[in-house]
Each structure stands twice: as structure tokens, then as C-alpha cells.
Image (spheres, rainbow, N blue to C red):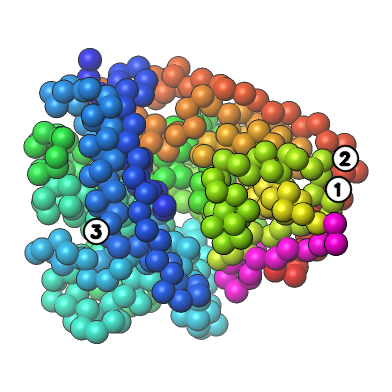
Amino acid sequence: MKHILAIDQGTTGTTVLVLDEALAVKGRGYQEFAQHYPQPGHVEHEPLEILASVRAAIAGAIEQSGVRPEQLAAVGITNQRETVVVWDRATGEPVHRAIVWQDRRTADACRRLIEDGHEASVRAATGLPIDPYFSATKLAWILDQGDLRARAERGELAFGTVDAFLVHALTGGAAHVTDVSNASRTLLFDLSTMNWSDDLLQRFDVPESVLPTVAPSAGTFGAIRGVDGLPDGLPITGIAGDQQAALFGQACFAPGDAKCTYGTGAFMLMNTGAEAVPSTHGLVTTVAWQIPGERAYALEGSAFVAGAAVQWLRDGLGFFSSSAEVEALAASVESSEGVVVVPALTGLGAPHWRPDARGAVTGLTRGTTRAHIARATLEGIALQNVDVLRAMEKDAGRAMGTLKVDGGAAANDLMMQFQSDVLGVPIRRPQLLETTALGAAFLAGLGCGLWPDKQAITAAWREDRSFAPQMDDAEVAAHLARWQDAVGKA
């Protein structure tokens, strides 16, 4: 039996799964890496620490699986999006720390571009607003450090989102390539031409010489070379940004199908089919995937902080020693007693797009305890998605019938029930919450011919539990009113 190795390179760690042809997980490896915060609003990673986490997770997954090298058919990669890596083409050495998608250092640069009147034309071309979240202004900022811009213009440097950096490293420097889903997150990619835009490159002051080749999400990207535990020549045949991969892994193949991934942030995507639907309600339009015979687009709303808010309770406030403890602490009180937490720790994303917003806690009384704040934090993570869903329904011109959920925090029953209550739609949770890695695996399987079509993943999707709305309308309305008031203060 052949197997796929799926690399899920996330914001706080890397997960690697080994899956067989029936999409059963045979081995799992995980490795965290450090987060760097050089000053407020700045978030960085060491690219070589990311690469080391990938290598360690590969070794762990292979060892646990017991799979022999000849049993591996291909590698799939999914990754944290928008994060910018710049490296030396000759040596593969990064020339600066990676600037992470959460980073807000280019807020002033984005504001100037908007004030200069570029917002409408950039959104029309890319489907994205001008915001520090996306890659272009981060890349320009790195190139403006020292002599890096001159080196880039001489062709010495390469830029990529994390997928491109990993492909370059895992192929021994042989490939510099990204896929359409990741390219569509850079502010440099034109959705109508499905390629890099000369106009956007000029506008964001990015030299074409640093850019990777753009390829479909399933196909041959390169071959493994010099990676412990993997045979040289093993093809990399699937790549997608993490949220698009999760949409694929959740079998959201029909227009109107939607999912929300609860990771470091919360990301809601709705498949819009072959049409790139422009948003007039603060969402982004993105490429979902491109596979043989099909290109799909999606509407997306992103909340920058979800699971990261629970980490803040753990690490910043010392509420508990393990993030898994948050549900029991939150469930120890019957309600949040009017406390509202707006988890805008790195600004507000869709549909507000307020990079200057900050986290807020309102409704505190003398009787407020850690448990009330913990419960309000989980509720705040869910309430962010109400704003996104309402905007998505308006843009798509349809009501959402069901929301599929995944990611680590989707295991939290208390939060999933509250999410269903305030959204007013049923929620379906799969047995395998790591649908991001599953999507990468399936794209790789399609790319190498292991599976003939999407029906295999539809058949493999299994429900763990569903949640239906239970809260009465008046209570939902009260939650939403307090939320809107608190967001106005963030």
C-alpha cells in the first residue's frame, strides 16, 4: 500500500502525518518552535527553526508509522500563509527573520497606500484589501533593510511564503515555486490573469527577480533531496495554503460549502466555485485551489486571534498550565456574567480591518473570576465569526446552511455549542480535526495519481459530532449587543 506524507507547517509548530490510501493516519509527528516578538506589533520566526521543526516532525511521523521509504508515493505541503521569508538563492540561508502574518509593522505603509488612492484598484485585481496581514508590504520592508534591495535586484535573493521556502530547502535548492492559493495571498497576484502583476509589483516596490514560479495546487513541484527519513527523488505533488487545504480536506467541494478552522486564528471560508466573487462587506476573495480540470475560488473572513487568545490566558496571565484546561475552567461557571473579551491582540481582521485595534475586556465586576474571563474568551473567539458569517452571506447572496469545523480548538465542545448558538446554524465536526494536513495529503495524492478524483475524500470524511442551535433568540441578541459594544471600544 502506498502512503502520502503531509507536512502542515503552522504558526506555532509543524505537524506531519503519514496517511495510507484509505486516508487513515499511520504516523504523526509534531514539533513546536519559538515565537519572536522584538517589539509591540512585531511577530517573527527564525526560518531555520521552522525548517528544523519540519525535519523533526517528519522523523517522528516516519518512525511512528513504520512505513518503509519505498511505500511513500508523494509529499504534500500546507503552510501558514502570508508569512514572508527571504533567503540567499545560492546558500539557502535566510537573510532576515520571517515576518509572520500576524505582524503589524507595516500598518503605516498600508495607510499611506490607501490615502494615496490605491485601495480600490488593488482590491479589484487581488481580491484583498491593503493590510499588513498580507505579504507585499512585509516583503518590501525586508528588502529595505541594509543592502538587501540591491542584492535582490541583482538576482541573489529569493522570496517565498513558507511553502516556497520549504520546497527550496527540501529539494536541496532545486525548486523555487509556490501554488496559486499561496500566491493569491501576497497582494502581488492578479486573480484575472492568475499570475504575478507588473503593476502591483511596481506599486508595492517589489522586484520581479525575487518571485517564485506559480503552479497549480496539484502537480509536480520538485523532488526531495537530502532529507533524513525520506528517499531522494520522492516527489512533492501537492501544495496549498493552510485554510484552502482545510476547505479541501473538509470536502467542501460545492459552491456554498463552508468551513471554519480554529487554529492560532479563526478562518472561515466559503467555496464560490469557478467564480471569483468580489466582496463588498469586508471579506477577501481568494483562490481556493487549482487541480486538473478545475479552478475554485472562495470568500474568506479571518480573525487573527483564536487559539492564540487561549495561549495568552495560559502564558500571559497564568490562568492554567495547559491550553486543554480552558474548557473545564470556562464550564465551571454557568455564564460569563456579562464579561466580554474581544481577542483583538494583533488588530481586528474581517470584516472590520482595523490594524490599530487592541484587545478589550469589558463588563468586569468585583465578582468576576478567572473562570468568567476564560468563558468570555471562548465566547469572544466564537462571536468574531458572527460578523464574518453575516458578511459572507451578503456577499454570496445565500444563507449558510451548515458550517464544518476543524483545528485544535474545534475539540472544545463548550465553544462549538456556543458557536452554533450565536451563528444560528448547525455545526459538523469531523473525526479527523487535522483536515489541513488531510487536504495537503489529498492534493498530493491527486498530483501523483494515487487517487483519481475528489470522490475519495468525500467518501473518507467522517463526522464525530454535530451541534445544533439551542439558545433562545433573546439571549443570542443580548450576547451580540454586548459584543458589538465591546468591539467599538477595542
Q: Is residue 30 left or right of residue 266?
A: left
**Front in this rendered view, residue 315 or 108:** 315
Which residue does the numbered mark 3 point to in the structure image?
48
Q: Amino acid at mark 2?
A: Asp
Q: CA distance from mark 2 to mark 3?
A: 51 Å
**Front in this rendered view, residue 49 or 140:** 49
Q: CA distance from mark 3 to mark 1?
A: 48 Å
Is there CB contact under 8 Å for labels 3 and 1?
no
- Name the quarter where the C terminus is drawn: bottom right
Horizontal and vertical percent position of residue 128: 49, 61
Magenta segment: 347-367
| Kind of element beneath mark 1 | helix
Camera-side mark, 3 or 1: 3
Q: Earlier in the sequence, mark 2 or mark 3?
A: 3
Q: Earlier in the sequence, mark 3 or mark 1?
A: 3
| Kind of element beneath mark 3 | helix
Residue 349 can be seen, yes or no: no
On screen, residue 63 above or below 102: above
| Kind of element beneath mark 2 | helix
Q: How many marks?
A: 3
Which residue does the numbered mark 1 point to in the structure image?
477
